[in-house]
Image (tube, rainbow, N blue to C red):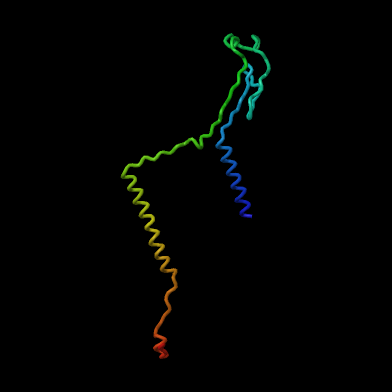
């Protein structure tokens, strides 16, 4: 059950990364000041109307086309960030000293744990060969 849950979670995270890292475009078509069509996956369809003097509100838009297409592009900001590191020698030395002391603190614990994890030697009071006087010749 745990493996199935982990696989579902991995697929969900992969799809989320895929959706977030893509860019999307939303196109909308306006005739005059009214919104006629919105499209999320393609080009928005035109209203099919020719610009006329009655549709436009003022004289400046009569000369131009009253219908206009607006394209909004949504680009990912997650992957655009760049990180730069600027270290001077004092900061770099401090980081190195910290890393070395941090690693050395664990080495002492490893040695102590290794010594404590080994079984103690057996208690030998007397030499068994001398006690029974059996010697190999």
Q: Is residue 125 above or below residue 117?
A: below
Q: As drawn, which residue projects farthest toward the left?
A: 90
Residue located farthest toward the right when viewing the structure as drawn: 48
Q: Nearest the camera: 127 or 113?
A: 127
Q: Pick the quarter of the image with the C terminus.
A: bottom left
- For residue 126, what is the image quadrant? bottom left
Taking the image as shown, residue 121 lies to the left or right of residue 58, namely left
View extreme (bottom): residue: 133
Foreground: 58 or 10?
Answer: 10
Is residue 56 positioned above or below 41 on the image? above
Q: Position of residue 20 (x, y in %)?
A: 56, 37
User: Whole-percent x and y of residue 1?
Assistant: 64, 55
Where on the picture, by quarter, is residue 12? top right
Q: Is residue 118 above or below residue 23?
A: below
Nearest the viewer among 136 and 109 is 136
Q: Is residue 4 left or right of residue 89?
A: right
Q: Position of residue 120 (x, y in %)?
A: 42, 74
Q: Position of residue 103 (x, y in %)?
A: 39, 56
Q: Residue furthest front?
A: 137
Q: How many circles with numbers are drawn on the protein?
A: 0
Q: Quadrant of residue 16?
A: top right
Residue at x 65%, y 10% (from the top left corner): 52
Residue at the image point whose x is 41% and y is 82% from the top: 124
| Residue at image coords 61%, 25% | 27
Q: Residue at x 60, y 18 (%)?
A: 68
């Amino acid at each position: 059950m745990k493996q199935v849950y982990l696989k579902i979670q991995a697929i969900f995270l992969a799809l989320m990364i895929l959706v977030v890292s893509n860019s999307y475009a939303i196109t909308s078509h306006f005739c005059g000041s009214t919104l006629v069509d919105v499209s999320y996956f393609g080009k928005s369809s035109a209203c099919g109307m020719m610009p006329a003097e009655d549709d436009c509100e003022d004289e400046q838009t009569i000369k131009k086309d009253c219908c206009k297409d607006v394209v909004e592009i949504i680009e990912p900001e997650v992957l655009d960030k760049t990180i730069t590191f600027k270290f001077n020698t004092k900061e770099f030395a401090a980081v190195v000293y910290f890393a070395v002391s941090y690693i050395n603190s664990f080495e002492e614990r490893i040695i102590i744990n290794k010594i404590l994890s080994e079984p103690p030697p057996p208690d030998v009071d007397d030499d068994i060969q001398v006690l029974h006087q059996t010697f190999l010749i």
